[in-house]
Image (cartoon, helix red, strand yellow):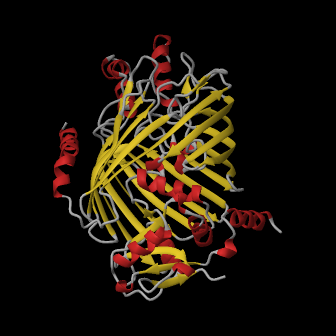
Amino acid sequence: MFVRRCLCMLISLFPALAVLAEDGAGEFEQPWRLGGFGTLGGAWSSVDTYEFRRDATQAPTGVSGGAGSASVDSRLGLQLNYRLSPEWEAVAQGLVRYRYDASWRPELSWGFLSYTPDAALSLRAGRLGLDIYPLSDSANVGYSYLTVRPPPDYYGGIPMQSFDGADISYTWPLGADVVRAKAYLGAARGKAPADPQGGVFVLDGSPIAGAYLEYLSERWTARLGYSRIEVAEELPFPEVFELLRHGGIPGGPALAEQLAVKDKRYGYWAAALGYQDGPLQTQFAGSVFSSDSYSLPDYYAGFAQIGYRLGAFTPYGYISAAHSPDAPPASGLPPWPVLAPLEDAVARMIESNMNDVRSYALGVRWDFAQNFALKAQVERIRGTHSLVLWVVPPGMPQPFQTTVLSATVDFAF
Amino acid sequence: MSIRCFVAATLLMWAGGAGALDLVVVVSPASGVERLSRDEVINLYMGRARKLPGGTAARPIDLASGAGREKALFYQRLLSRDLAEVKAYWARLTFSGQASPPVQADNPDQVLDLVARNPGGVGYVDRTLVDARVRIVYSFGE
């Protein structure tokens, strides 16, 4: 509530701050700037047992069994920048996309005040995008990247896109190149659908912190970072926890403790390397998610991507994978037939958050007009478990393979 | 001729006859800057550096996309990137609140005017347009 009040105050300050605006920004810079971006896209999938999603924050999309939908990739954002002085700037960005609750309700995706006292240092406070993974803070801006969507095996597992807090970044010149360090601290914002009955995993208010070091040269970019979150709310399965804790089942309370996510810590290591030379661009990234809870199993993920520009066309391809190294843990409950439904519910809690999936994608981006790009992509996904794909109820995760066809028009202005 | 050379040559031809333009980077004499390296020009135009070597706050000035062939040629010569790639790069920085793209001038005369009147101004124009109001600090050469 406090953070929401602060954000409301920040936004209501915009007109008042205008009075304070100096003309120091220079005669050729307008203090106001309105920009926008968007994607109109459709996706289609062949498999019956899963619904395709681009990330874990989306409600089931209906993209399954030969059906398609525009909900996976379509989105629209508007951003207002207001420069108060050469050092101070206020930014607000609104976003409409398909959400965890199957609605398209607009959200405030960014809303912050930034202070840049000199060329090297930048401080921002308010609502900020999360870049646990490289470029994940611009995942909604389809025009800014090559593929139809950031590879879901790698990017899709994070159930949040922003946080309320502050970040600081510092840039050092290193010869002709640049090294940048960034750290952030705040309270996460994110919700993810947890079951077909409408249960929602709420990350809002979970303390989150992270830092990374980045190297930028004309051709190479490299980044290494770590982020940690402590989840503030329990999974939305009160009846399972109640039964385990107070049902008099041997081993029940111990299992409930291992399944709980609240007040436990989760870490994300992320490394990335990029190379761009003229028309050639490549990207490699890897990550490790570590967890103290049975319900959110550890996993590794990575992708390798290559694109080659030929005039207005850029064909590309990527391979991506995510893998949970450990088999689902034994529940430790007695093998009583009466407990079979509970065993099933526990197995579903764990296995729907596991990863064992590989994707191969080929596509092309066509910059057909100024500020517009058309993309088409085909991908083949195989595996046994995916944190991102949605298991069509009432099934359990099972081996699958599917083809996903996608096309989008992206724009930015 | 490799595909890459062919594509580069095609792009340069499309940019409007590369041989006709001799682009140079200019600053205001008041900036005290005598020369910029190619890497310094890249860092200024990609938003990675915000100061000129002498310490003055830099104000890089771009040309609007419809303002002529200089812009496409500038980014091709500087970074081997086409304008859609440059736009995509700035879309990422803009909509993640990191930086704003350079101010856009409507034509080369306006670039010269803005550079001449701002100690931190940096612009690119055809060498034949340069006059005493600005100083050449980087030349792409032939």
Percent x, y for residue B9?
74, 67
Percent x, y for residue B114?
39, 72
* Quadrant housing residue A106: top left
Q: Is residue A124 above or below residue A341?
A: below
Q: Residue at x 62, y 21 (%)?
A: A49
Q: Is residue A340 above or below residue A241?
A: above
All told, the count of numbered labels is: 0
Q: Residue at x 30, y 39 (%)?
A: A263
Say if residue A334 shows up in the picture.
no
- Give the residue furthest to the top: A338
Front residue of A272 and A338: A272
A308 relative to A39 in the view: left or right: right
Q: Residue at x 47, y 35 (%)?
A: A75
Front residue of A292 and B119: B119
Front residue of B119 and A57: B119
Percent x, y for residue A63?
59, 25
Say if residue A258 shows up in the picture.
yes
**Which quarter shows the N terminus of chain A?**
top left
B13 relative to A357 in the view: left or right: right
B110 relative to A356 in the view: left or right: left
* Quadrant housing residue A362: top right
Percent x, y for residue A21?
20, 59
Q: Is residue A17 above or below residue A103?
A: below
A304 relative to B43 in the view: left or right: right
